[in-house]
Amino acid sequence: MQLKNAAILAVRLLALYLLVQGVIILPAYLKMAFIPSGDSSAQAMTSMIAFSVLAGGIMQFIIAGLLWFFAHPLADIMTKELPDTSTQTEEQSLPDVQAVAISILGLYIVAHATPSFTKGIISLVYSEHRSPFTLFDAIGAIVQMGVGLLFAAVPWKIMNLFRRQQS
């Protein structure tokens, strides 16, 4: 199997994983939308929390769809600096497989952090009762997304960094 085909398969498996996780958690997302509350300030707070949780859940479904439909271009990006294997019949080298695996790990990190990022941004923008924890959650999600994008975009540089640390 060519590395590009393995990358496409892995990206689509990640998309299916996110879709299944979203379906499993969907009842909890929907339950948040129908939490009753007493006074108007509690109603506003509950509505904002429900909206941010639902937005994060919807983002998970959107990311799953995007990963599925853009698996080919993502695989092109992940394998662009790897040798062309279309004419080779031998097995792939370990560094090539590691580069694809690091890219897929990066996509997973981004997909995992996006709902938290969305909830954090919505909470920061629309909440009247901002707490430092909300800010820390948003910063943590931004850092996770940055690390994930770095892993997905330049896996060979990540591998070189680890190689230098070993020597």
Image (cartoon, rainbow, N blue to C red):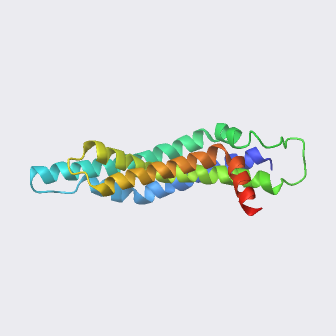
Does the image show residue 15? no
On the picture, is 54 further left or further right than 63? Answer: left
x 30%, y 46%: residue: 124
User: What quarter of the picture does the C terminus occupy?
Assistant: bottom right
Nearer to us in this view, 130 or 51: 130
Nearer to us in this view, 81 or 37: 81
Quadrant in the rendering for residue 67 = top right
The percent position of residue 142, horizontal first and vertical second, equals: 46, 48
x 35%, y 58%: residue: 27
The percent position of residue 102, horizontal first and vertical second, equals: 66, 53
Q: Which residue is outermost to the left?
A: 39
The percent position of residue 72, horizontal first and vertical second, equals: 67, 39
On the picture, is 98 further left or further right than 56? Answer: right
Nearer to us in this view, 82 or 10: 82
x 15%, y 51%: residue: 43
The percent position of residue 157, horizontal first and vertical second, equals: 70, 47
x 68%, y 39%: residue: 77
